[in-house]
Image (spheres, rainbow, N blue to C red):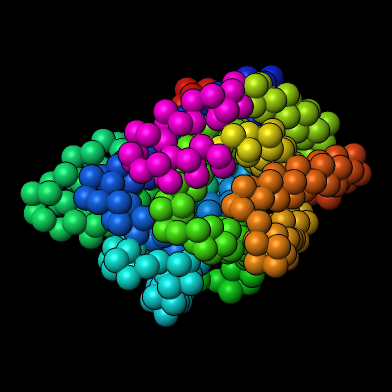
Amino acid sequence: MTEHRDLTQGPVSGHLIAMAVPAAMGMIFNTLYNLTDFWFAGQLSDDALAGVSIAGSVFFLILSGSIGMQTGTTAMVATEVGRGKTDSVANWIDQATGLGLVLSVACLVIGLAVADPLIRFLGAEENVAPFAKSYVLIVLWGCFSFVLSGVAAGALMALGDTKSNRNALAAGLIANLILNPVLIFILKLGVAGLAIATIIIKLATVAYLYGVLKKRTGRWVQPAFNIKDWLELLKQVAPASFNMLTVVLGGFITVSFIGRFGSQSVAGYSVGLRIEQLLLLPALGLNSAVMALVGQNFGAGNTERVKETYIKALYTGLGIAVFSIPVMIFLSPTLLSFFSSSETIISTGTTYLRIDALAFFAYVVLFISVASLQAIKKPLFPMYLGLARQLVLPAIINYFLIVVLDLPMIWLFVSIITVVICSAVISHCYTWKQLNRLQISTPPAQPASSAGQQRCQQSGQQSGN
């Protein structure tokens, strides 16, 4: 019997909070991890900080595959959990692991081919490019660890467990604080030390999460390579990965335009973006809880409970926005000054945060809408919207504003919030329409016996999350 939290019973708000809080904490630890890397890079030099910032944009290519695998795994596994099909749950975890290994090889090959031209495209100057290249090339060889950790985290999320990934990320932050100074300053590895520490920590994370999965499912994961199942899984993974890829490529477009104002402007924007992401993490934790809740209830046939989850998640997200927006507006200069004393870096990051604060709740709406659509197996609309929001519109609008009209950088940030707000309105309207029209085509959960169902519920209660 697979241990899991039964999200088809009990108060929706309670499940949202119980799952979202650990997920958000885990994401906070992960973002602090990235900010720690920025801080150590800044201790080397402003050029090293700019190089790591640019490398981070390239590095997100790896994360797009990892996040896609995590999302796809959650969507497939959560539905089977809601149906009470233990064997199918194990099969999808095995298939996701096998697919993840293959995609990791593809990610390595593509990454090695495009890393250097991408770094140049993003405006890295000659004194900055070596730092960016050193970081990227090392991390690429460990890309499989990112993908597999995404699979394991997604499977655990579908089972109602967001605490294990939080624990892994917290331990990773502590390990990073120890390894970075040793590798950078004692062993004199510089920026390469940041990348090596990341790979070591991520490998340990994979081992831990798969160990937890073994306890949850009662068996070790066995990578499977069934093409038919892969194709079904890819229907969820590919749109999610592509959606994340549009975020990455959209970031390239934005950074390339900001690069026209200098590498330190890129560094300021990158650090400001990380601070914003830190404030958005509670909403992203909520996003994780929504996907698991909607997925299990979709599988169980609880249509009204699916809609209830969406509504209550929006209200919760509004509360997050009320807290975060004043921080972005009033505390941004102080937060930026922690990472650099450069006036350009602080000014750019502060300007970005204050303007983008206007779109904070719009980001929250997008997260919740996308999570709900993916959980009910309708991932294509978020992909199309992401393509327009992240790539097509920014490329056209920003080229016109910055290249044709030669306007200052602030207009880049104004265009960002305009597109985000319009996209959020469209996404909410589409999602609400789909939830109102939702017709559950899958049968309700059919557990082997009522006693088995009770054991499953009891184990979920005992496991907490």
Expressed as whole percent of the image width and height from the top left, the position of residue 67 reads 53, 54
Please indicate whether residue 197 sits to the left or right of residue 260 in the image: left
Residue nearest the viewer, comparing 186 with 380: 186
Residue 437 relative to residue 243: left or right: right
Q: Reply yes or no: does residue 334 show up in magenta.
A: yes
Residue 460 in the figure: left or right of residue 204: right
Residue pictured at 16% horizontal, 44% vertical: 181
Could you tell me which residue is drawn at 24 percent across and 57 percent down? 191
Name the image quarter holding residue 389. Answer: bottom right
Q: Is residue 33 above or below residue 385?
A: above
Magenta span: predominant SS is: helix
Res. 19 visible in picture: no
In this rendering, the answer to whether 46 lies above or below 340 is below
Which residue is depicted at the point 23% across and 45% down? 43
Q: Is residue 246 visible?
A: yes
Nearest the eye: 366 or 255: 255
Task: Please state the horizontal and vertical placement of residue 363, each as a whole percent of the image.
Answer: 67, 40
- Residue 359 higher or lower than 105, as above or below: above
Give the number of marks.
0
Seen from the viewer's position, the closer of residues 255 and 439 is: 255
Q: Is residue 324 above or below residue 67?
A: above
- Residue at 53% x, 58% y is 258
Magenta span covers which residues?
Answer: 323-352
Q: Does residue 240 show up magenta in the picture?
A: no
Image position, residue 335 (x, y; %): 42, 31
Lateral position of residue 246 relative to residue 302, left or right: left
Q: Nearer the viewer, residue 41 or 285?
A: 41
Q: Position of residue 327 (x, y in %)?
A: 54, 25
